[in-house]
Amino acid sequence: MFPTLDPLLHSELRLAVMSLLISTEEAEFPYIKEQTGATAGNLSVQLDKLSAAGYIEVEKTFKGKKPCTICRITPTGLHAFEQYVKALKTYLKPR
């Protein structure tokens, strides 16, 4: 029997965001948008879902007078991502 894959991370865009944040200390919204190819609206919705689950923290600040959104993965998010990868590997092993 295979383990259940975390449905929150099984979304292509949310998985891409988490993968990106794993490799960086933090990332600004425009960088995440550029790297994932997402629209601003869709990315905002997905970041909200990850934040609500405690997988990322979102800091809204300003650079001069321009709003700046910074995202960071949380320890909970890191653990969830590691468990997701571990579960996914069980699907890839030949039987």
Image: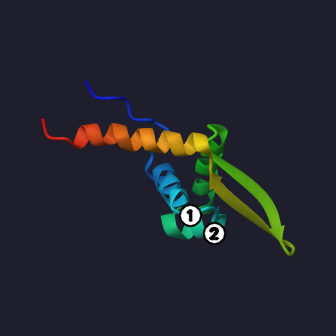
Residue picked out by circle 1 = 24
- Residue 24's image quarter? bottom right
Q: Residues within 10 Å of mark 1 (few under 14, many from 20)?
A: few
Q: Position of residue 44 (x, y in %)?
A: 64, 54
Q: Secondary structure at mark 1?
A: loop
Q: Position of residue 60 (x, y in %)?
A: 78, 58
Circle on res. 57: none
Q: Secondary structure at mark 2?
A: helix
Q: Residue at x 34, y 29 (%)?
A: 3
Q: Residue at x 19, y 41 (%)?
A: 93
Is residue 61 rendered to the left or right of residue 23? right
Q: Position of residue 77 (x, y in %)?
A: 56, 43
Quadrant where the C terminus sits is: top left
Q: Is 14 above or below relative to 34? A: above
* Amino acid, disc 1: Thr
Quadrant where the N terminus sits is: top left
Circle on res. 30: 2
Q: Residue at x 59, y 56 (%)?
A: 43
